[in-house]
Image (cartoon, helix red, strand yellow):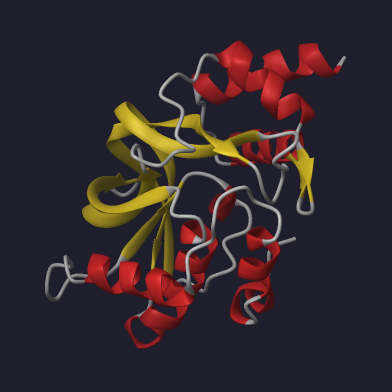
Amino acid sequence: MLTRDLFDSGSYVDLLAGTADQPAWTMEAIEQSMRDTLSGRVSGEAVWLFAYGSLMWNPVIDAEEQQLATLGGWHRSFCLRLSAGRATPAVPGRMLALREGEECRGLAFRLAEDTLLDELRLVWIREMVHGLYRPVWAQARLADGRRVSVIAFVAETTHPQYRATDELNAVAADVAMASGPLGSNREYLTRLDDALARWGIHDPHVSDLVQRVKVRVW
């Protein structure tokens, strides 16, 4: 279970650094990435974070506002090879990310200004420990009709763990078998599917993958 203390204490970085087959980023590199991203913030605008995976059911962070949101131009894809957390180098799995094209429905969190850096630091440790993602600013449409700029973590396509092909049968084979110190890859997929259903979100990529994994497990 991911907790604030796990990130604050440095235990999360230590845990993943010890089980992955790629080096973990240093805290200095993680924090520099956060500062670089914030330098692109439009002055005076609130900072929103787009959640499309585990942040939806276990955000860990404190937020002032939460809204259903649609992010245009990106879709969910298990396109990152996973060798830590819910997998191992010997039995790798797949990590969820965003790839270009279509649209993605998820949640948007508005962060309080007075605790912004503390909350974002937790997010950056969580998402950027291996540099698998690229934080970008993008436009999202909230359920109440507002359009806001959000920070979204998309797949870093130059990373060695990126998989350009996310053919579902191949992904299902990895997800069905992988497990690590944070649990099984299959459990992550199940929780994602449950979270999407709870919020009334249908994602065909996810639902199709769930069915293919079930066939392999049964």
Q: Quadrant of residue 28?
A: bottom left
How many numbered discs, if any? 0
Q: Which residue is found at the position 69% from the left and 51% from the top?
A: 85
Could you tell whether 162 is left or right of 147 in the image?
right
Quadrant position of residue 218 = top right
Give the image location of residue 5, x and y in percent. 67, 78
Judge by depth and name the residue closer to the eye, 133 or 111. Answer: 133
Image height of 164 relative to 13, above or below: above
Direction from residue 73 to residue 8 in the image, left or right: right
Residue 2 in the image: state x and y as whole percent.
69, 63
Where does the image place residue 56, in percent across and percent down from the top left?
Answer: 55, 51
Compared to residue 211, the image places residue 156 above or below, namely below
Residue at left 53%, top 70%?
Answer: 61
Nearest the eye: 134 or 76: 134
Q: Quadrant of the N terminus?
A: bottom right
User: Residue 52 in the image: x percent, y percent?
Assistant: 48, 44
The one nearer the camera, 165 or 78, is 165
Residue located farthest toward the bottom when viewing the structure as drawn: 114
Residue 181 appears left or right of 211:
right
| x 62%, y 42%: residue | 195
Rendered view: 60 above or below 108: below
Does any portion of residue 79 appear in the rendered image? Answer: yes
